[in-house]
Image: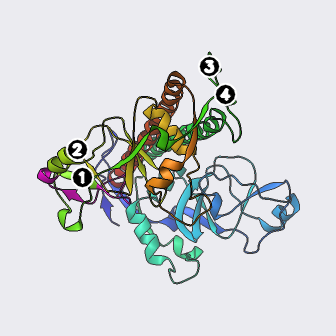
C-alpha cells in the first residue's frame, strides 16, 4: 500500500496518507436507464445537467420512485457525472427523497467525510484516473459504473483532518457562489436600469430619473458632437510576441495581449498621430460591436479601424457615453450580417442625451455598478485560483 503526505496541511496533522481503491470507500450505484414519465410535482429528478446545484424542475411520481429506486440519494451521499460530462461531483445536502438518471453515479460513503472525498475526487490525480477509464470514443463519452470504483485515491484516515479539509473547501465554494451570485445580480440590475434610465423609442424622457431633472432629452447624432479617432495602422512585421508596449487587436481587446511593439515606434506614433486621452471610451468596431474599455493612461497601442474612440467636446460625458454604447442601435447595421461599424455608420447613429449634469449623474451611477461587477468578478477569480492551488497541494 502506497503511503505519502500532502505538501500543505492543517497544523497538528503529520500521519501518512494511504492509497485506496474508491470502491473500498463507497458503495456505487446508478440511476434509472429509461426516461421517466415526468410529473408537475412529486419526487425531484436529477440528471447530469443538474450537478452544480442538485436542483431540478423535473419530477416523477411517488409510485414510480417506490418502484424504481431501492437505493436512492440521501443526505451526505455524493453524486458524480458519468455520461457526457465525466467526473464532476457534488454532495447531497437535502434530507428529502431524490431520484436520479443513469448519467449520474451515486456514491454512498463508508465512514469517510463526504466533503473530503468529493474534493479529493476533483484533484488532478483522481481526474487522470477517471480519464484513463473513460470511453472517449463513445458518443457521448462515458465511464461504466463498474470502472469508477477501480480508481486509486489517496486519503487520510484521520477523521478530524478529513472534516477540516472538507469544511475548508466547502466554505471556499460558498464564498465563490456568493460572489458569482452578487456579480450576476448586479449585471441584471445594470441591464434593467439601462432600460429604465434611457428614453424608449419615440419618448423624450426616461421612466426613471434622478431627482431634480425634468427637461426633455435631445435627439442627436454622434456626428453633431465629434468625430471618430483611431490609432495609426500597425503592420504584422512591426509586432513581436514579446516587447515593451502591448498591442491590442480585436481578438485581445479587453483581455491579455498576444502582440507587442517597440517603445521607439510607440513614442513616434503617439507623438505624430491620433492617440486616446485618459477617460476616452475605446469601442470595438468589428466582431462583437460595442465592447468598451476606458483608457486609463497606460502605455498601450490599439488596432486601427477595429478599435476606435469618439473624439468630442465637453457636451458629452465619457461615462454617459459608455452607457450609450451599451444600448444604442447603430445606423446601417441593425438586422444586417455586417460585423463592422464603419465611421460613417458611427457618426450617423442617433441617440438621446440630457443636459451635462444629468449625463454626469447617470454616468457615475453606471460606473459604480461596473466597479461592483468588476470587484465581485475579481474576487471570484481570486478564490478560484486559491481553490485550484489548494486542491493540488492539500491532496495527493
What is the spatial separation of the Cα atoms under label 4 and label 1, in whole angstroms? 41 Å
Up-down: is 249 above or below 357? below
Quarter of the image with the C terminus in it: bottom left
Tell me residue 168's x, y (percent): 44, 41
Is 301 left, or right, of 96 in this rendering? left
- Please tell me the numbered disc located at residue 98: none
Element under disc 2: loop
Residue ID at (62%, 15%) = 212
* Number of other residues with Cα within 10 Å of mark 2, as a class: few under 14, some 14 to 19, many 20 or more: some
What is the spatial separation of the Cα atoms under label 2 and label 1, in whole angstroms? 8 Å
Q: Is residue 228 magenta?
A: no
What is the spatial separation of the Cα atoms under label 2 and label 4, in whole angstroms? 39 Å
Q: Check whether the beta carbons of the residues at disc 3 and disc 4 lie within 8 A of each other.
A: no
* Number of other residues with Cα within 10 Å of mark 3, as a class: few under 14, some 14 to 19, many 20 or more: few
Q: Which residue is mark 4?
A: 208
Mark 2 or 1, nearer chain start: 1
Residue ID at (55%, 52%) = 330
Say which of marks 4 and 1 sits in front: 4
Say which of marks 3 and 1 sits in front: 3
Q: Which residue is mark 2?
A: 299
Up-down: is 34 above or below 158? below
Residue ID at (64%, 69%) = 103
Magenta-colored segment: predominant secondary structure:
loop
Q: Which residue is mark 1?
A: 246
Q: Check whether the beta carbons of the residues at disc 2 and disc 1 lie within 8 A of each other.
A: yes
Q: What range is drawn magenta here? A: 248-265
What is the spatial separation of the Cα atoms under label 3 and label 4, in whole angstroms? 10 Å
Residue that extends furthest to the right in the rendered view of this protein: 63
Amino acid at each position: 500500500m502506497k503511503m505519502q503526505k500532502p505538501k500543505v496541511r492543517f497544523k497538528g496533522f503529520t500521519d501518512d496518507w494511504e492509497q485506496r481503491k474508491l470502491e473500498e470507500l463507497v458503495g456505487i450505484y446508478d440511476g434509472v436507464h429509461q426516461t421517466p414519465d415526468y410529473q408537475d410535482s412529486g419526487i425531484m429528478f436529477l440528471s447530469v445537467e443538474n450537478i452544480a446545484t442538485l436542483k431540478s424542475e423535473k419530477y416523477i411520481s411517488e409510485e414510480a420512485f417506490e418502484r424504481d429506486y431501492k437505493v436512492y440519494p440521501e443526505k451526505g451521499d455524493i453524486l458524480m457525472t458519468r455520461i457526457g460530462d465525466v467526473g464532476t461531483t457534488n454532495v447531497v445536502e437535502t434530507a428529502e427523497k431524490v431520484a436520479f438518471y443513469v448519467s449520474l453515479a451515486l456514491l454512498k460513503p463508508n465512514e469517510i467525510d463526504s466533503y473530503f472525498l468529493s474534493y479529493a475526487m476533483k484533484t488532478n490525480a483522481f481526474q487522470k484516473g477517471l480519464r484513463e477509464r473513460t470511453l472517449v470514443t463513445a458518443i457521448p463519452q462515458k465511464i461504466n459504473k463498474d470502472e469508477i470504483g477501480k480508481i486509486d485515491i489517496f486519503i487520510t484516515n484521520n477523521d478530524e483532518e478529513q472534516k477540516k479539509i472538507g469544511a475548508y473547501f466547502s466554505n471556499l465554494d460558498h464564498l465563490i457562489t456568493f460572489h458569482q451570485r452578487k456579480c450576476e445580480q448586479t449585471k441584471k440590475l445594470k441591464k434593467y436600469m439601462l432600460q429604465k434610465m434611457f428614453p424608449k423609442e419615440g419618448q423624450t424622457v426616461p421612466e426613471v430619473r434622478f431627482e431634480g431633472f425634468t427637461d426633455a432629452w435631445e435627439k442627436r447624432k454622434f456626428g453633431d458632437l465629434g468625430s471618430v479617432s483611431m490609432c495609426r495602422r500597425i503592420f504584422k512585421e512591426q509586432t513581436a510576441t514579446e516587447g515593451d508596449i502591448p498591442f491590442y487587436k480585436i481578438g485581445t481587446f479587453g483581455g491579455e495581449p498576444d502582440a507587442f511593439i517597440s517603445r521607439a515606434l510607440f513614442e513616434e506614433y503617439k507623438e505624430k498621430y491620433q492617440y486616446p486621452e485618459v477617460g476616452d471610451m475605446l469601442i470595438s468596431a468589428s466582431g462583437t460591436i460595442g465592447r468598451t474599455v476606458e483608457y486609463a493612461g497606460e502605455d498601450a497601442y490599439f488596432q486601427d479601424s477595429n478599435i476606435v474612440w469618439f473624439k468630442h467636446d465637453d457636451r458629452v460625458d465619457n461615462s454617459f457615453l459608455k452607457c450609450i454604447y451599451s444600448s444604442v442601435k447603430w445606423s446601417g447595421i441593425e438586422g444586417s450580417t455586417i460585423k463592422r461599424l464603419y465611421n460613417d455608420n458611427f457618426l450617423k447613429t442617433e441617440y438621446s442625451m440630457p443636459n451635462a449634469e444629468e449625463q454626469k449623474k447617470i454616468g457615475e451611477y453606471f460606473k459604480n455598478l461596473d466597479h461592483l461587477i468588476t470587484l465581485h468578478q475579481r474576487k471570484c477569480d481570486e478564490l478560484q485560483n486559491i481553490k485550484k492551488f489548494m486542491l493540488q497541494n492539500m491532496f495527493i
